[in-house]
Amino acid sequence: MALSYHRLLHAILDIGEAMQNSGAEISRVEDSINRMCMAYGVRRVNSFTITANMLVSLEVDDDTVITQTRRLHQVSTDMTRLDRLNDLSRYICAHKPPVEEIQRRYAEIQNLPRLSKLMTYVGGVLTAAGFTVFFGGNLWDALTASLLALLVESMMLLPIRRQMNPLFYLFGTAFCTGLGALILYSMGLGNHLDAVLIGCIMLTIPGLAITNAVRDLLSGDTFSGLSRLCESLLQAGGIACGFALAIYLLGRGIYG
């Protein structure tokens, strides 16, 4: 059966989209797409990826140009899934399997079980408590941050999150968390409010996105790096404003 470059490009774009949605940097996505396409004897590959869009154009042997585009929506960071996708891209480059096998292996990766809600809550509690102690809090502060971590993770897992602007959603999450911290502190739970707030903030900061933005800038992907950096900084600003508003409304008596 003759190779269909349309189906091949569609399958490769699926992999690239999944890599981007799992937290991969732009340079990794573009390099993987280029290598997979070139492995099948494509004369030329032109790929352009930013945080919101992916465009790939192939020039095949008979001078036919095939172009496909894909709208990107980053869902969450999943390093396990990203590692499997990287392995799949290397396998494709080394063995050049038929499109049907690529689709089958891709479907297996997409059907991998995601992190359970229990483990998400446990991770959030450990993270918030650990950072609270690291920044000068005591055991009671860690307990307060753990309770607030349950609130943060619950809000981050709500289905409505995917339908809202990330900036405003993170602002609302930070505002509710800040109010909760101030209410618990006024009730006598916790001794160092600043440490508790810092521990909770760490659950919402887009650290990986900022890191990937810097990596994109260093690797020469200026437009993609600046786009992702601006988006990350806006989200970080929304988080800061949410906590600041909560402190302004309820914390004036605490801070004098």
Image: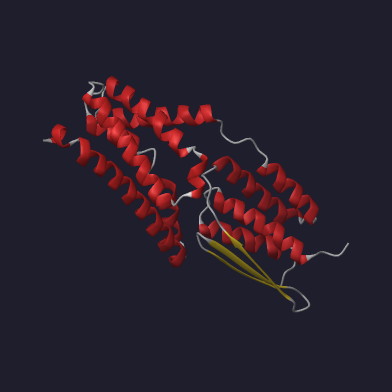
Please identify the quarter of the rendering in which residue 156 is found: top left
Quadrant occupied by the N terminus: bottom right
- In front of the other: 246 or 153: 246
| Horizontal side of residue 3 vs 196, given as left or right | right
9 vs 119, left or right, is: right
What x and y, as percent, mark residue 208?
44, 47
Q: Nearer the viewer, residue 181 or 74?
A: 181
x then y, percent, for residue 82: 58, 46
* Corner quadrant of residue 111: top right
Name the residue furthest bottom: 63
Q: How is the image coloured?
A: secondary structure
Q: Residue at x 31, y 51 (%)?
A: 237
Residue 154 % position (x, y): 45, 33
Residue that protrudes farthest toward the right in the picture:
1
77, 242: nearer the viewer: 242
Q: Position of residue 224 (x, y in %)?
A: 46, 63
Residue at 63% from the left image edge and 64% from the top image edge: 34
Quadrant, the C terminus: top left
Residue 206 seen in this snapshot: no
Compared across the picture, whether 21 is left or right of 205 comes to right
Q: Residue at x 74, y 61 (%)?
A: 8
Whether residue 105 is visible to the viewer of this picture, yes or no, is: yes
Residue at (65% x, 53% y) in the render: 15
